[in-house]
Image (cartoon, rainbow, N blue to C red):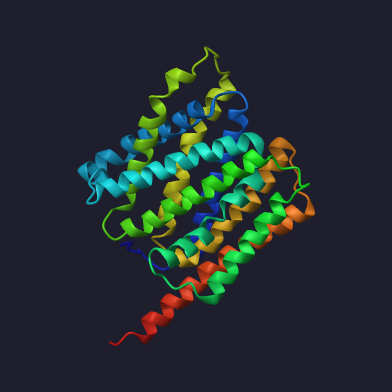
Amino acid sequence: MTTHTAARPLRAILLVTGAVFLFACMDATTKYLVAEYPAPIVIAVRYIVHCLLMVVLLAPSMGRQLVQTRRTGLVLVRAACLAATSLAMALALIRLPVAEATAIVFLSPLIVAVIGGLVLREKIGWVGSLAAVTGFVGVLLIVRPGGGLDPVGVALALTGAVLIAMYQLLSRVLAATESTMALLFYGALFGSILYGVSVPWFLDGQVPSLLQVGLFLSMGVTGGLGHFLFTAAHRHAPATTLAPVMYVQLLWASLLGWLVFNDVSDSLSILGMVVVALSGVAVVLKSRWTRRTVVAAAPE
């Protein structure tokens, strides 16, 4: 259970805005590097740097708390979903612009709403159902025939959306018993081991330039710092307040895609991104309103 140090929504929103900017930077860097190196190597370096940063910065103060879990099996399944998402996203970025890939992955909150209704028996109501349908329409605008997107890249991004939805659902289930930092650490540790052992199979003797070394290291920093800012934001405001701000990542992704790769989305793709974002925000606001209604109706 998250404890808020104080209600500072503006500070929390700024922290999330910074976090999603770092996530967008990580995706842009991933796209740049997977053009030259196999995706497992790129992902391995990201997770290893992230994991080492957590060990160096957090282990001295947290000690055993960093690795203590109560439902270790589910924690590892969650970590596996995150690791698989990273690979799907990296492979998708080889074939898709950053903005379009990000928009497709942002279907995950809508998938969470649908699966939550079917599996967790959570009521999504007509607003949630309409938002889910509208979100898929938004994705269809992005991946429409004639839009020029690679079908394999689209399939990989959609796979990433499903995997990240499973990751988010498991995060919701585990939030009651596991600490945030332990969940983050096991995600980084699992990815480090999984992709680290695969590195020898993909090495081809290519020596990275100083720029590429800096970019490799930056992924672990941007990913780790992004998760830190995101976690810190939730100390100052509830998740339902901050979730809509996550869609600012679409703006950052579009901007970086244009600046770094000269990718400019067409008008229908931009419309699709807006539709996906608005649908996700609608689901979040509906969830927040439902919780407030339940709390207000509860007997004292």
- Residue 106, visible in the rendered structure: yes
- Residue 11, visible in the rendered structure: no
Quarter in which the C terminus is drawn: bottom left
For residue 119, which quarter of the picture? bottom left
Q: Residue 257, image x and y in percent?
A: 68, 42
Quarter in which the N terminus is drawn: bottom left
Which residue appears at 52% of the width and 12% of the height? 205
Q: Residue 36, image x and y in percent?
A: 61, 23
Placement of 48 over or under 266, stated as above or below: above
Which residue appears at 37% of the width and 55% of the height? 171
Q: Residue furthest top?
A: 205
Q: Residue 77, image x and y in percent?
A: 34, 45
Placement of 106 over or under 62, stated as above or below: below
Which residue appears at 70% of the width and 57% of the height? 272
Q: Is residue 94 left or right of residue 214?
A: right
Which residue appears at 22% of the width and 42% of the height? 63
How many numbered discs? 0
Q: Residue 67, image x and y in percent?
A: 25, 43
Pick whichever, 66 or 270, lies toward us.
270
Pick whichever, 167 or 209, lies toward us.
167
